[in-house]
Amino acid sequence: MSKLTLDRILQSQGIGTRKYCRTLIVDDEITINGEVINDYREKIETDGLIFTLFGEEWQYREHVYIALHKPPNIECSRKPSHHPGVLTILPEEFTWRDLQPVGRLDHDTTGLLLMSDDGSFIHAQSSPKRHVPKIYVATTHDPVTPELVAQLLSGVQLNDEPAPLAAVSCKMVDTHHIEIVLEQGKYHQVKRMLVAAGNHCTALERTAIGGLTLAALALDEGDWCYLEPEQLALLVPA
């Protein structure tokens, strides 16, 4: 059980600066259990807390964990260089909360992207020691062949890697789509592996991380959702 002053609670949820949050409270904009709370110094129990601001209900979350169906031409960076950053397609409170991508997808790669303001979670999910499988579906320039699948499974040599890199699993989806499962997170890995195997990628989508699938989340491009404990559990390798 944890109690915080109401202004700290609002600030922690990404509503704005402490000064702005105090103004909202003093102006009778915050309701808890149907009661207007206008003393920003009042300490409130955060466990299970739901408050109302401007007629909208907010659930208190110590940390946020979200899944985003990343669209194309979006950079996974808080300081993008050539395309809009991923935070531009999310609610403003996430910027205030210092939400960060968990790993990266190239600007032209679509699919499942995790984001959080929990540094320990980000570090754990990004660590190669965890061997979390990630599933990608690549659209290929040339037809997919059994030989291509076999090469990716046996390993291909990339220029800056000391040893060949192999897919955990790989299968043909149709004539120009191939599903590749990787545990590493090397730079442009799927694209470079396909080039090394004699083909190349014209589009790429990440469809799953661990047991968490984009299909199960049912998110359209650009949509997002909070991840609840049962969904976060799917990210842990079996």
Image: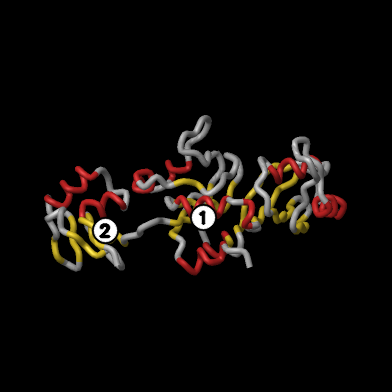
The quadrant of the rendering that contains the C terminus is: bottom right
Q: Is residue 128 left or right of residue 67?
A: right
Which residue is disc 2 drawn over?
Answer: 56
Identify which amino acid the numbered label 2 is placed on.
Glu
Please identify the quarter of the rendering in which residue 174 is found: bottom right
Determine the CA span between mark 1 and mark 2. 24 Å
The quadrant of the rendering that contains the N terminus is: bottom left
Counting from the top left corner in percent of width and height, residue 211 is at 60, 64
Q: What residue do we see at 20% from left, 56% from top?
A: 5
Taking the view exactly as shown, the residue that stands out farthest to the right is 147
Counting from the top left corner in percent of width and height, residue 50 is at 27, 64
Q: What residue do we see at 45% from left, 58% from top?
A: 225
Which residue is disc 1 drawn over?
Answer: 220
Helix, strand or loop under label 1: loop
Q: What residue do we see at 73% from left, 52% from top?
A: 177
Counting from the top left corner in percent of width and height, residue 51 is at 24, 61
Identify which amino acid the numbered label 1 is placed on.
Asp
Helix, strand or loop under label 2: strand
In the displayed structure, 201 sits above or below 80; it is below
Q: What residue do we see at 12% from left, 50% from top?
A: 27
